[in-house]
Amino acid sequence: MTQTLPPDIPAQPLTGVELQDKVNELGNLSKEEKAKACGYVTITKRGVPRVNMMKFLNALIDAEGIDLDSSGNGYGRGGRAASFRISVQSNGNLLIGAAYTKRMGLKPGDEFDITLGRKHIHLKQVGADEEDF
């Protein structure tokens, strides 16, 4: 038993400018009613209409030109932000994470001189000028 969509619902979900225009035209309706009017409805196996809110909201975000997939800083796909703090591990080592090494443009094999201060550790790349940091 297949059930078809009501005639007031588009067969294909609206996207882009058409979606934006329709949402603006619908004014004070609820999100679910707007999603349904824009074609973001499927019929379940039992014949019950189901509103696809996530698809609707994602299409609306895409139509607005908002890019949520990139972190915007060119350093990967997002994730945790570098805090510029590290902790001593249980084995006594200090581990500098990939976020820091990428940000500094470091490659495997780069060497550093370590100088200890009273409350800090300085890492100076071997062969780098003082102006590089």
Image (spheres, rainbow, N blue to C red):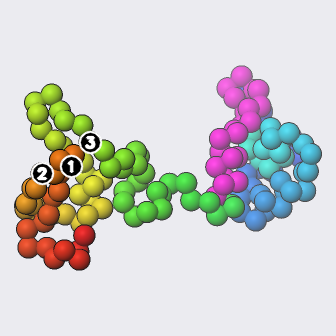
Q: Element at badge 3?
A: loop
Kindly report the distance in space between the C-alpha atoms of the residues bearing marks 3 and 2.
16 Å
Dot 3 amino acid type: Ile
Q: Residues within 10 Å of mark 3 (few under 14, many from 20)?
A: few
Q: CA distance from mark 2 to mark 1?
A: 6 Å
Q: Which mark is residue 86?
A: 3
What kind of residue is marked 1? His
- Res. 9 visible in picture: no
Residue 91: quadrant of the picture: top left
Residue 69 % position (x, y): 50, 54
Give the magenta-colored segment's residue range. Answer: 42-62
* Crowdedness near tag 2: few (<14), some (14–19) or many (≥20) residues, C-alpha within 10 Å: few
Left or right: where 39 falls relative to 124: right
**Residues at marks 2 and 1 touching, judged by CB atoms closer than 8 Å:** yes
Numbered badge on residue 120 = 1
Q: Position of residue 58 (x, y in %)?
A: 64, 49
In the picture, the disc for residue 131 is none
Q: Cβ–Cβ below 8 Å for labels 3 and 2?
A: no
* Comes first in the chain, label 3 or label 2: 3
Q: Which residue is mark 2?
A: 116
Which amino acid, by three-letter code, is at mark 2?
Leu
Q: How many marks?
A: 3
Task: Mark 3 vs mark 2: give the one in front.
Answer: 2
Q: Are marks 1 and 3 in contact (CB under 8 Å)?
A: no
* Quadrant for the C terminus in the image: bottom left
Specify the farthest residue to the top.
46
| Residue placed most toward the observer, 112 or 108 | 112
